Image (tube, helix red, strand yellow):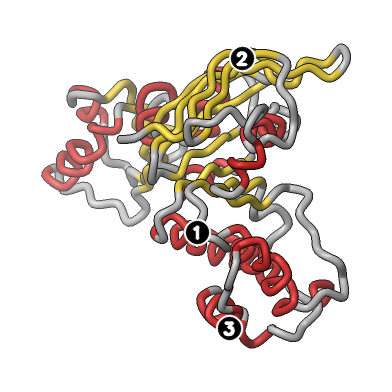
Amino acid sequence: MDTVITVEGLHKRYGDVVAVDDVGFEVRRGEIFGLLGPNGAGKTTTVEILQGLRHRDGGAVAVLGMDPGQQAGRLRRRVGSQLQSSALPPRLRVGEAVRLFGKSHGEVDVAAVLADWGLAAVEKRPFAALSGGQRQRLFLALALLGRPEIVFLDELTTGLDPQARRATWDLVHQVRDRGATVVLVTHLMEEAEELCDRVAIIDGGRVVAVDSPAALTARQGGAVVMTFSSKGADAGFLSGLAGVNAVTHDNGTTVVTGSPRSVVPVATALAAAGIEPDDFRTRYPSLEDVFLTLTGRSLRD
């Protein structure tokens, strides 16, 4: 796949504070690439440098073959963005915002844009009166004007309720389906797991891992944990199955830990032994577990 963003040895300092320290990664055309890490990890500074909005102190950066520090004007005509600090004048109406931002892209069919993003019903509503989900729809619509090749989305769902967050995730998939590469900044593990083809986990201004969420959790996330009520049945025989690390019993509950590939053999062996619990639960490792393994602390800390 084509590489549309290359970052090598990126460094940025604010006085005595090192915000970005030797960061490196690549983004491939057509993927949703996540920058995942706690607040203050250096994610926003990194994407601002990628867009030419902030100067770097060191390292090499190429976005669509251009250096954002030297060719920011040319680059901005080919990228779209929704920044963490995005806001519009409170009285600016939805239709007016699309018309205003569209002027820099030539002719824009305002009605078609509003219809595409489910905003036709609020065309005359001022920005201040929009719900959180409607604001994010508008920001995405504005970011996609001019059909950019890369779209930067920074903490897109912060402050949204779960229903609005999931609706926004669907919109992000639409952005990629329309042909754009997406760089998504987030501190939400579930969001990264749901949306991203690959993620760079950033902590303290450094990249600690880059891969797909599935590969990271398989390699760094630890064991799968299976629990069920044994109701007096002895499930100790499960310890002999391939991939099972341990079997413990506590107060009528059996806990089995093992590799992801052990889940099906465990369930099959239980059924063969006539043990069919109705509360069989499986907990797979998450990106939170990966972050804990790599940094020694929770992403939420």
How far is mark 1 from mark 3, CA to CA?
16 Å
Q: Which mark is residue 59?
A: 2
Q: What element carries label 1?
A: loop
In this orientation, does residue 84 appear? Answer: yes
- Amino acid type indicated by mark 2: Gly
Marks 1/3 in contact by CB < 8 Å: the verdict is no
Disc 3 or 2, which lies upstream in sequence? Answer: 2
- Residue at which label 3 appears: 111
Quarter-of-image position of residue 278: bottom left
At 51% from the left and 76% from the top, the residue drawn is: 116
Q: Nearer the viewer, residue 17 or 274?
A: 17
Q: What element carries label 3?
A: helix
Q: Give percent across and percent down for residue 54.
A: 74, 31
- Residue at which label 1 appears: 147
In this view, 286 is above or below 274: above
Quarter-of-image position of residue 17: top right
At 34% from the left and 49% from the top, the residue drawn is: 280
Q: Nearer the viewer, residue 185 or 282?
A: 185
Q: Residue 22 carries which label?
A: none
Circle 1 crowding by C-alpha within 10 Å: few under 14, some 14–19, many from 20: some
